[in-house]
Image (cartoon, grey):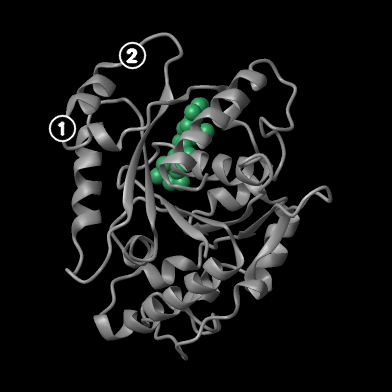
């Protein structure tokens, strides 16, 4: 049975999409235990669809959006009546199979690893609007069934979430085994983590919480920041912090439309950034018990 990882932080612009995209991209390229290759699914669960833009050529994206091969279809059946003032009620409690929504973007012939994506759409906004419990329940149920299908078909599912408390963050956390919290060492970073921890533990007693992992991102290659020291010294957060940090490299900010990633780029510093990404991913996977 596969593992589900959500990348989340209530704070915006801390690198959630960058981290989710790069870990999803590198995972099926990593040799695990010397032989095993990973089947990976990336789910873009942010109406801003930044992950989709990074991984898919624009033409492919628009085609998939038109075909409704997007995250929206996990939650609702039809978008013909999407209207911000008419709240959505799922027409039926069964989502489409993951095989119908996922699009392959990497599958080397040499081994069985692959990366598939379910892109997002701005139309997700319509279902993000405030709704009563009996309206969100069908969507929650559909999302849960869909994730069970993902677990049966992928070794690892990575979900990129938007920075807000919403139906998306709630369903994503509820169906995840792990949550990766990227943190940029900057003022208010501690508050962002505190909020995340509260959000993770705010659940019914019967529900399982995902295991949190804190990743310092966009970190200086030369000096340790006060914020990082402060968070690492906090007894509530200490054990959740990855030892490795993702450094600030232009190479991580450049990919677009599936191109320019460190595993394919020859630009200066790409090799260093590539090695950095591999050490972060290996440590994360170890913590997640994936290898
Ligand atoms: N390690 C890094 N090195 C260099 N640039 C980075 C790094 N991490 C993130 N960035 C840049 O920081 C900006 C914010 O990153 P990103 O979009 O991934 O954040 P986010 O948390 O997903 O934002 P949002 O809350 O809007 O979804 C982007 O321009 C991205 O390219
Ligand atoms: Mg993002």
* Front position in the image: 79 or 237: 237
Q: Quadrant of residue 250?
A: top right
Q: Mark 1: give few (<14), some (14-19) or many (20+) Cα within 10 Å.
A: few
Q: Is residue 148 left or right of residue 163?
A: right
Q: Badges 1 and 2: C-beta atoms under 8 Å apart?
A: no
Q: How far from the left and from the top, in percent, is residue 129?
A: 34, 70
Q: Quadrant of residue 30?
A: top right
Q: Which residue is at 66% across, 46% downward?
A: 28
Q: Which residue is at 55% across, 30% downward?
A: 277
Q: How far from the left and from the top, in percent, is residue 170?
A: 31, 64
Q: Tag 2 or tag 1, which sits nearer the N-term? A: 2
Which residue in the protein does label 1 denote?
Answer: 235
The residue lying furthest to the top in this view is 222
User: Is residue 121 positioned above or below 148 on the image?
Assistant: above
* Front position in the image: 121 or 197: 197
* Front position in the image: 39 or 158: 39
The residue lying furthest to the bottom in this view is 92
Q: Which residue is at 75% across, 56% downward?
A: 59
Q: How far from the left and from the top, in percent, is residue 105?
A: 72, 53
Viewer-nearest of discs 1 and 2: 1
All told, the count of numbered labels is 2
Helix, strand or loop status at disc 2 = loop
Q: How far from the left and from the top, in percent, is residue 212?
A: 31, 46
Which residue in the protein does label 2 denote?
Answer: 224
Q: Is residue 67 left or right of residue 76?
A: right
Q: Which residue is at 54% across, 63% downward?
A: 121
In three-dimensional space, the C-alpha distance between marks 1 and 2, rounded to whole angstroms, equals 19 Å
Q: Quadrant of residue 202?
A: bottom left
Indicate yes or no: mark 2 CB to ligand 1 under 8 Å.
no
The dot on residue 119 is none
Helix, strand or loop status at disc 1 = loop
């Amino acid at each position: 049975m596969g593992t589900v990882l959500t990348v989340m932080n209530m704070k915006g612009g801390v690198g959630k999409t960058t981290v989710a995209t790069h870990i999803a991209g590198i995972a099926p390229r990593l040799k695990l235990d010397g032989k095993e290759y990973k089947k990976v699914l990336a789910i873009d669960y942010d109406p801003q669809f930044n992950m989709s833009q990074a991984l898919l050529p624009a033409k492919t994206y628009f085609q998939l959006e038109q075909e409704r091969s997007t995250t929206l279809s996990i939650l609702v059946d039809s978008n013909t009546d999407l209207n911000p003032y008419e709240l959505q009620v799922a027409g039926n409690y069964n989502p489409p199979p993951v095989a119908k929504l996922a699009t392959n973007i990497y599958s080397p012939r040499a081994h069985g690893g692959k990366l598939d994506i379910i892109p997002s759409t701005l139309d997700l906004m319509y279902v993000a609007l405030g709704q009563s419990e009996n309206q969100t329940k069908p969507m929650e149920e559909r999302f849960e069934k869909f994730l069970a299908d993902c677990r049966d078909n992928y070794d690892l599912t990575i979900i990129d979430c938007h920075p807000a408390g919403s139906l998306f963050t709630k369903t994503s956390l509820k169906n995840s085994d792990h949550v990766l919290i990227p943190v940029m060492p900057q003022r208010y970073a501690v508050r962002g983590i505190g909020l995340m921890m509260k959000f993770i533990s705010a659940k019914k007693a019967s529900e399982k919480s995902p295991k949190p992992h804190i990743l310092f991102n966009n970190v200086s290659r030369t000096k340790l920041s006060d914020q990082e020291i402060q968070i690492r010294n906090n007894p509530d957060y200490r054990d959740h912090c990855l030892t490795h940090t993702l450094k600030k490299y232009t190479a991580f900010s450049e990919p677009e439309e599936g191109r320019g990633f460190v595993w394919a780029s020859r630009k200066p510093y790409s090799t260093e950034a590539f090695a950095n990404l591999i050490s972060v991913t290996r440590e994360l996977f170890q913590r997640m018990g994936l290898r």
